[in-house]
Image (spheres, rainbow, N blue to C red):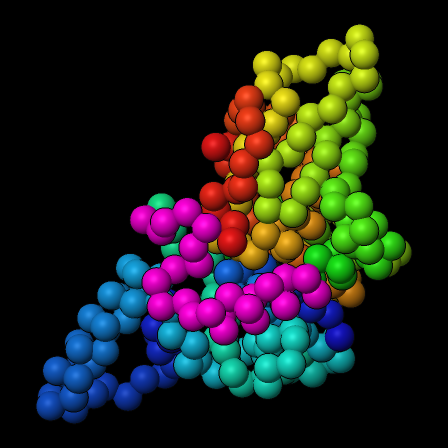
Amino acid sequence: MGRILVANRRGHQVVEWATTDTEEARAQIVEAERILREAREHGALISKKVDGKHVLDRQPFDPNVEEYQILAPIAGG
Amino acid sequence: MDNLNVDQQRSPATPPAPLAYTALWRHRFVASLRQWFGMTRQTGRRNGTVDVVDAVDAPADDAALERPWLRRWDHLPKRSAGYGFSRADYAQAHVRAREVARMTLGDDLWEQAQRQGYLDLPSHRFPGLTYRLRVGRRIEVICKRGAHSPWPYDYLCINPTYPLPEEEFFAQLYLYVRDREDLILAVAAPQPWDQALGRTF
C-alpha cells in the first residue's frame, strides 16, 4: 500500500493505492500517478520517504514508494 | 473547478431532463461562487478511482480531495484559509498539519523544533551561513563572523503559493532549504525585519 500526502489548507489529505495485481489497484496507481504529474506541472515539488525520512524527488512516479508528499510551490514576499 | 465538478465530468452521466437544467445551472453557479470565495464544498465521495481519505480521524468518505494548485488564491486576505473556513476548520487543519510535519521531519527533528522553537540548517553554498527556520515566520539568516551572505538583510520572506497551516509549511520549507537551496536563492525576498508569513495561518 502506498500513499500521497496532499498538503492543502485542510492540513492534508491522503491518496492511497494498493500494490496488488488487480484491476482496481492498477486504476488507483494510474490515478495517483496522474495527481503527482498534475501537481508537478503546476510547480509543486514532490518528496518521497526514503529510509524513514522525506527527501525531494525528481524521479517518475514509482508505485513501490511507501509515501509521497506534494509540496506547495514557493514564492518570495 | 472544484472536485465535485471533476467527478461529475468523469462520470458516465445520463443527460438531465429539461426541467433539471435550471437546477443544474444553479448548482454550477453556486459552485463557481464557492470556488471564487474559497469555500470548496467537501461533499465528494471519491476522486476518480483513488480512495481519498483524511489522515487524521475523519472517516474515509468525509472529504473530496482538494488540489490547491488548480485554483487561484491571490484574492484571499493574509493568514486566511478562505471565507467560510470556521474556527473548527482551522483547529482541525492545525491538528492535521502537526501530524504531517512530524511525519515529514521525523520524531526527533519535530520534537527538537518544538523544544527550541526553531531548526537550523547550514547552507551548502555559503560556508558559515545558517538558515534558522521557525514555524510561521520568515527564515532568519545567521552568519558566522567573516562569512559571506548573498542577501543584504537577515530575514527571508518565502511563502507557499496557496494557504497552508504554518506547521505544515514549516516542514516543507525545511525540505526546500535542505534539498533545493537553489530555489531558496531564486525566490527569497530579503527583508530587514522579522514578520509572520502571509500565506500561512
Is residue A43 shown above or below B20?
A: above
Query: Residue A25 location in percent, x, y?
Result: 67, 78
Tell me what residue is drawn at x 41 percent, y 67 percent.
Answer: B85
Residue at left 76%, top 60%? B102
Task: Answer whether residue B191 is magenta in the image.
Answer: no
Image location of residue B121, percent across then percent down:
78, 34
- Residue plotted at (57% across, 32% down): B194
Q: Nearer the viewer, residue B146 or B73?
A: B146
In the shown orientation, is residue B83 left or right of residue B145? Answer: left
Q: B166 and B9: which one is in front?
A: B166
Q: Position of residue B76 (x, y in %)?
A: 36, 51
**Residue A2 appears in view:** yes
Between B100 and B23, which is closer to the camera in this rendering?
Answer: B100
Asked if residue A43 can be seen in this view, the reply is no
As drawn, B179 above or below A33: above
Q: Quadrant of residue B126?
A: top right
Task: Kindly identify the residue that appears in the image at 74 percent across and 24 percent down.
Answer: B142
The image quadrant that residue B184 belongs to is top right
Q: Which residues are magenta?
A: B75-99
- Give the image quarter of residue B191: top right
Tell which of B148 and A68 is nearer to you. Answer: B148
Left or right, B188 with respect to A77, comes to: right
